[in-house]
Image (cartoon, rainbow, N blue to C red):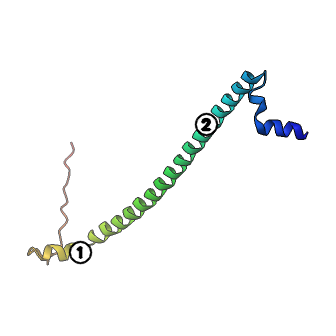
Amino acid sequence: MKNGIVSILKGKFLVSGGAPKNWLFLVFASFLATVMISSSHSADRKVHKLAALNEEVKELRSQFVEMRSDVQRLKLESTVRLTVADKGLLPSETPPKKIKVKSTTP
């Protein structure tokens, strides 16, 4: 048991008679490890990008709500009245009259 561990630590399995098989396996294992690490980094990158996009969506949603409330405030009659008063327009003193049109269908 001790000799087996010592021979592995010294790397005798790399220079013995069946070494080409061992080298081929090590190259294959190294390739798989590289692919796995690359895949992991790619997944991490996507997770970080997704988190950043979620933050951007939250920010844009809050801007939308803020702008919508500003527009609703600007559409109020009192705000429009103040805006056009600066230009010399005043509300009408007489209420509007309803026009009724009688249709003449044969």
Q: Nearer the viewer, residue 7 or 82?
A: 7
Q: Nearer the viewer, residue 4 or 100?
A: 4
Instruction: State the mark number for residue 101.
Output: none
Where residue 58 appears, as percent x and y from the top left, is 45, 60
Query: Which residue appears farthest toward the right when viewing the image?
Result: 1
Cα gap from disc 1 to disc 2, whole angstroms: 65 Å
Write down the residue under mark 1: 79
Please say if the residues under marks 1 and 2 sit with CB atoms less than 8 Å apart: no
Q: Residue at the location (44% across, 56% down)?
A: 57
Residue 9 visible to the viewer: yes
Q: Nearer the viewer, residue 34 or 61?
A: 34
Q: Secondary structure at mark 2?
A: helix
Where residue 69 appears, as percent x and y from the top left, is 35, 68
Task: Choose top left, top right, bottom left or bottom right for residue 12.
Answer: top right
Using the image, determine if residue 45 lies above or below residue 81.
above
67 with respect to 26 (left or right): left
72 with respect to 41 (left or right): left
In the image, which is nearer the foreground, mark 1 or mark 2?
2
Amino acid type at mark 1 = Thr
Write down the residue under mark 2: 34
The number of numbered discs placed on residues in the rendered structure image is: 2
Task: Choose top left, top right, bottom left or bottom right for residue 2.
Answer: top right
Q: Residue at the location (21% across, 42% down)?
A: 106
Using the image, determine if residue 82 lies above or below residue 64.
below
Q: Residue at the location (59% across, 40% down)?
A: 39
Q: Earlier in the sequence, mark 1 or mark 2?
A: 2
